[in-house]
Image (tube, rainbow, N blue to C red):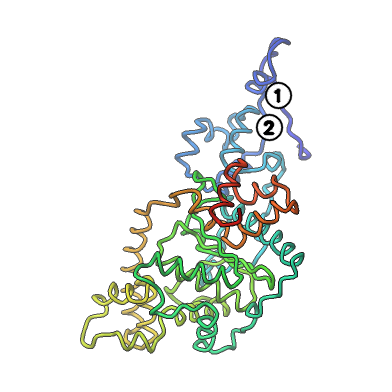
Amino acid sequence: MNGTARPTREGAPPANRESSTIALMVRVQVSPELLGWASDRSGVGEAELARRFPSLEQWLVGATRPTLKQLEEFARVTYTPIGFLFMKKPPVERLPIPDFRTVADEALRRPTANLLDTLYLCQERQDWYRDYARANREAPLPFVGSLTVETPVALAAERLRGVLSFDVEDRGSSWTEAFTRLRDQADECGVLVMVSGVVGSNTHRKLNPNEFRGFALADRLGPLVFVNGADTKAAQIFTLAHELAHIWLGGSVLDDPSLAGPTGNESERWCNKVAAEFLVPLDVLEGLLRPNTPIATELDRLAKAFKVSTLVVLRRVFEANLLRWDEYQQLYRSELARVLELVERGDGDGGNFYNTQPVRVSKRFARALIESTLEGQTLHRDAFQMLGFKKYSTFTELAHRLGVL
């Protein structure tokens, strides 16, 4: 193919037919391997793709070819740049930041289009904010990169609490309130915290917490943390604390914070420990534990007290030497199954657009971008793209709600 499609014609349509009619009849030579790659990369379920493209199975075995119009629709549904489908081999899409989503020898998971597009969008926003911060002579943030993996865990957690003001008694009455306080405090301190369960503003492209829970993009002027909003609120709190620990380390990373067992990466182990101590200080935990009470019956009460997940509580109880490793593993597996069931029953990333959008893009980022656009420093077109909408009326309403207008 030499990178170029070779369409074949099935019959000659009359000269007066429109180009759209021609597209319906032109079949394109495209590699079945590329079609399979695009299907896997999309993250769209096999059943859904089969429903939308009844001939997909035949395309994948080379028994027939899609028409040009079908290929264009396939590219749209699978979030694939159509030029990729005319290549000889599937491209190798490398994540632009280290991928720590593996445990021990588990193979790396191919990133889906939803993950890649979310990461690229956040990088675009961070690049813009870095230029904005430089133009406005904002000072570098002193806490970014201020710690190392050699920093004692208790000291590191105390450093985070000193900046973020997130003591146990300051977390409110619910997991949602606690997460909101930590998110807003981090945003106020200079971290661009973006929380979303969808790609951009597209509610049809839901993020899967089983693929990733968050990532950190370290930068002295505009550090960015993304938290997968499709996860449970309790899990989001731990993810946010974990990613903030990476910011204090000064590292950019994609990961899947887990307390199930040891991870092979030193910085991941350190961030897990710091996040756990930050959220559930051992001295406070030991003071709340009731003697002679089975740990399994204490999980919900302690999770509510600290506004974390029961999985975090379990890990901290183990680290307090109150559970054997085999007991911890058994309880963790049981509790994880219950938590995953709660995730499946979640109601997604809905709500009022003007309430959710500043959270999806970070209030700090949204205010800066709107102010820059109103001052004529940023094109409305670019601002709309990064904010995730197309209408000027939406822009002005969001500006009013954020207090910019």
Quadrant containing the N terminus in the rendered view: top right
Residue 383 drawn at (x, y percent): 67, 50
The one nearer the camera, 211 or 183, is: 183
Q: Residue furthest front?
A: 405
Residue 158 drawn at (x, y percent): 51, 86
Q: Residue furthest right?
A: 2
Query: Which circle marks residue 103 in the picture?
Result: none
Q: Which residue is mark 1?
A: 8
Q: Residue at x 61, y 68 (%)?
A: 253
Residue type, numbered disc 2: Gln
Residue type, numbered disc 1: Thr
394 displayed left or right of 281: right
CB within 8 Å, label 1 to label 2? yes
Q: Residue at x 52, y 63 (%)?
A: 227
Above or below: residue 10 compared with residue 358: above
**Quarter of the image holding residue 61?**
top right
Q: Secondary structure at mark 2?
A: loop
Q: Residue at x 58, y 56 (%)?
A: 111
Q: Residue at x 59, y 50 (%)?
A: 113
Q: Which residue is mark 2?
A: 29
Above or below: residue 28 compared with residue 218: above
Above or below: residue 326 compared with residue 60: below
Q: Secondary structure at mark 1?
A: strand
**Gap in Å between the C-alphas at discs 1 and 2?**
8 Å
83 displayed left or right of 160: right
The one nearer the camera, 260 or 303, is: 303
Residue 251 drawn at (x, y percent): 64, 74
Residue 94 drawn at (x, y percent): 67, 59
Q: Earlier in the sequence, mark 1 or mark 2?
A: 1
Dot 2: within a 10 Å radius of its alpha carbon, few (fewer than 14), some, or many (20 or more) residues?
A: many
